[in-house]
Amino acid sequence: MSKERDKMIKYLKEITIPELRNRNFKGSFPHFRKIENGKTNLLTFQFDRNGGGFVIEIANFNKSEFKTHWGKIIPLNKLTAHDLNERQRIYPNTLTEKHGTDSWFRYDKSKLDKVYITLAQKVVERIPIMEQYWTENKVTEIEKEPEPVTNYRHSSLWQRIKSILKFK
């Protein structure tokens, strides 16, 4: 493992994992699960094999035991998101992998150590989207605060342009 990956794991364990534990997830890095009311919610951190990034894979399982296609039974307390064919990926800024692994949580794009903290916090921010999937079996972007309505009749041309182009 690289020093950078080790740092990323350190901050995920310090910032993100306690939030998962608060939501009753058990397991050890990189695989976590919550078994409640006959449903198993799964989360796995998958790192880029070329280094510098990771993505989160989540899945649901609704049976009392998991049996592989070759007949091996995996107990629920050992089940991972990678064991299931149907799973969802969670990205830092989008709902889809638009640019390959460049869409992933990337810690190789900055030389600053705060990138690790920022990414671990970003994972925490994405937890509501993960919870939506575990509850509803679908992922949609959580609504953000609407942009304030501008009264164009009294604003300058520059203010209108800034509003249209989303400049602050």
Image: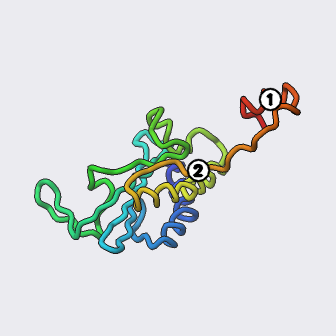
Q: Which residue occupies 32% across, 68% down?
A: 39
Element type at marker 2? loop
Q: Residues within 10 Å of mark 1 (few under 14, many from 20)?
A: some
Q: CA distance from mark 1 to mark 2?
A: 24 Å
Q: Which residue occupies 78% across, 30% down?
A: 162
Q: Disc 2 marks which amino acid? A: Glu
Q: Residues within 10 Å of mark 2 (few under 14, many from 20)?
A: few
Is 75 drawn above or below residue 142 in the view shown? below
Q: Is residue 44 left or right of residue 153?
A: left
Is 141 drawn above or below residue 165 in the view shown? below
Expressed as whole percent of the image width and height from the top left, the position of residue 27 reads: 39, 69
Give the color scheme: rainbow, by chain, secondary structure or one colour: rainbow
Element type at marker 1? helix
Q: Which numbered circle lies on residue 143?
A: 2
The residue under label 1 is 160
Is 123 drawn above or below residue 73 in the view shown? above
Expressed as whole percent of the image width and height from the top left, the position of residue 41 reads: 37, 64
Q: Which residue occupies 54% across, 46% down?
A: 92
